[in-house]
Amino acid sequence: MGNVRFDAIRRAMEHRAIAVASPEGRVKDYFARDVFTREKMKEYISGDVLLQLFDDVDNGRTIRRDIADSVAIGIRKWAMERGATHFTHWFQPLTGGTAEKHDAFFTLDKNGMPVEALSGDSLYQQEPDASSFPSGGIRNTFEARGYSAWDPSSPVFLIGDTLCIPTVFVAYTGEALDYKTPLLRSTASLCHAAREVCQYFDKQVKHVHANLGWEQEYFLVDESLYSARPDLVMTGRTLMGHNSAKSQQLEDHYFGAIPERVLAFMRELEYEALMAGIPVRTRHNEVAPNQFEMAPIYEDVNLANDHNLLVMSIMERVAEKHHFRVLLHEKPYAGVNGSGKHCNWSLQTNTGINLLAPGKNPYQNLQFVTFLVNVLMAVHRHNGLLKASIVSATNEHRLGANEAPPAIISVFLGKQISEVLDKLEHASADEAIIINAKKEMKLGVANIPEILLDNTDRNRTSPFAFTGNRFEFRAVGSSANCGAAMLTLNAAVAEQLMLFKEEVDKRVEQGEAKERVLFDVIKRYIVACKAIRFDGNGYSDEWKEEAKKRGLDCEQSTPLIIDRYLSDSSVDMFGKTNVLSRGELESRCEVKWETYVKKLQIESRVMGDLVVNHVLPAAKRYQTMLLQNVLAVKQVFSADETESLNEMDYSIIRQIEKHSRAILDGVERMTDARHKANRQPDERSKAIAYHDHVLPLMAEIRDHADAVEMIVDDELWTLPKYRELMFVH
Ligand code: ADP
Ligand code: MG
């Protein structure tokens, strides 16, 4: 009888030998070839329409309906010249990933003649049959309609023969059913609040926008090995598997050269990404075996997020061509590093100033400190909520493990910036703000050094780190839509800047000098948000104790962390910034709990199947072999001799028996726990029940299954092992 696992390994080895040619050409010749860029628009859309379009987009206004037709004609012409036959509204449902429904340009005219068209209306708005997307109760049956509507701030692009139109996805009532809608609202709110605060320092600032540079981590696994692991196929992670004797301890993968076959995959991935206008720049191995990372140059947060989602789907497609599967799950393998998606975030003005970088003169420096400290305040006040923005059933396995961001949000600032803040905290206004006879301002203490961008004291254990000219939110999961984290951060900072401005304005109106008030409020903030600053080891147990004392959110259970969306401070903040209403927040929580439950339900079922169909049969077979051996030995050897001869066999037979019983018993209890959880009255209680009662049993069963894997004859084991999944490439 053939062993599925050995067949898979053999095929994986064959895949290594298949060379795939790398794409050729120079980046500047094919960058954004598949994107309807502004340059191309000039060719396909008439001047006055274009002016109107750009003006609306640049000022964040809704596009006038009457220009939609002209724009649509230009778009279709360009797309069809590039071979497109279909178009789709491309949106970001709350399930994660992206969704699309393709329609042909082809249609019949009044006389029944075939024509190819894209009307302004179909560019502008569609009603995808979206009743299967989760809405958390927002769309009840009588108004079950969801609309996708064009987001002209992100350009349309081609994938194969399909024109993709980035869209928001909203309910009949206008409530958001996606990530893009609130992300756009949050950037509008943040830009406004930041611009207002910038006026204290520079009247030239008309516009501020948020940047995002994501770093996408992922694993690759050979497709035949992947196919032989039902858990990978069904859940995206291994539900069992004994640790490989060699794992990541040597860190030789991180520093090593990229394997040839992987390199071929990366080249093609980058080529495809660049054609789609995604400015990818960095590729390297990551810490764990077969783990890699790609990162583009940062862009406006909305566009960057679209690009990240697009890259995730391009990755999957290109991987298949190279007989790989890409694992975007946060924790495909226990015991080795998981995958995250660091979100590098900064604020930039239309005058070209990065508000999170130390400036060249005292005003810019005070402005920098103002924004830095306001971000700290926002993160401090909403640390529990920010954690809620990154949790999921999949990221849960990554957080808090000793090789990932801890499940407590704190901010790492580094020595230089910490010193600056400490000095400001202890300075008097007279020391800090010196206004000379010419009415020029000097900063007495905050003489901020140019921070070396590659400053070496980066702390990898921090979930939220300042890295010289930006903040890096590292707790975001590799499979997540960064939008969830970014919109929360944007909104929290927007609210904070609004509060700051209110306070400063009030005192200035009462006659105090602006510079002094700014300094005074900042100084008070530095003290108020001290608890969020932590430069130490985020993995240590002492930190957990310390964080509790500081009043930071230390909750570890995903379903309970989700509650933070509905706390008074969150509802207030999202309301004040017009990002999400209470109803929208409630529906989001419903979806989050529901998704959590579904994921765990599937995992738990797959686990049950795996142990019953793979682990136990292999165990039984091996046990039978040993038992037969014992009997045979007894026939040949004398009683005295057999006792010592069979000692090892007996011990293994007993171990197998013990683990098999424990597995069977565990599966029974797990099934019970699942049934009980399913009977809970609402999604939140179900999620809590899954977290508290099903998850621990899965861990228990896994321990026994892994122990069985250790003892069973390698020949009988049918599931590809960790050492094969991670080291064959
Ligand atoms: P690391 O050393 O953390 O791996 P890189 O220097 O490769 O980081 O940059 C990671 C990401 O940060 C890239 O996407 C990069 O474009 C982005 N980045 C750099 N500067 C900024 C900034 N000012 N704002 C936002 N993102 C930035
Ligand atoms: Mg980084």
Image (tube, rainbow, N blue to C red):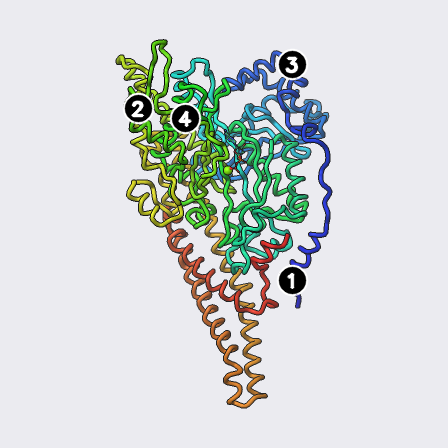
Query: Residue farthest to the left?
Result: 510
Judged from the image, the secondary structure of the residue bearing numbered disc 2 is helix
Residue 608 appears in the figure: yes
Residue at image mark 4: 448
Q: Which of marks 4 and 1 is in front?
A: 4
Task: Find the distance from the CA under tag 4 to the CA under tag 2.
Answer: 19 Å
Asked if residue 318 is positioned above or below residue 173 in the image, the reply reads below
Task: Find the distance from the CA under tag 3 to the CA under tag 4.
Answer: 50 Å
- Badge 4: few (under 14), some or many (20 or more) residues near its Cα, within 10 Å? many
Q: Choose between 174 and 662: the one closer to the eye.
A: 662
Confirm or deny contact between disc 4 and disc 1 (CB under 8 A): no
- Badge 3: few (under 14), some or many (20 or more) residues near its Cα, within 10 Å? few
Labels 3 and 4: the sequence-earlier one? 3
Q: Nearer the viewer, mark 4 or mark 2?
A: 4
**Amino acid type of the residue tagged 4 in the rendering:** Ile
**Amino acid type of the residue tagged 1 in the rendering:** Phe
Labels 1 and 2: the sequence-earlier one? 1
Judged from the image, the secondary structure of the residue bearing numbered disc 1 is helix
Q: Choose between 68 and 567: the one closer to the eye.
A: 567
Task: Find the distance from the CA under tag 1 to the CA under tag 3.
Answer: 62 Å
Residue at image mark 2: 521
Residue at image mark 1: 6
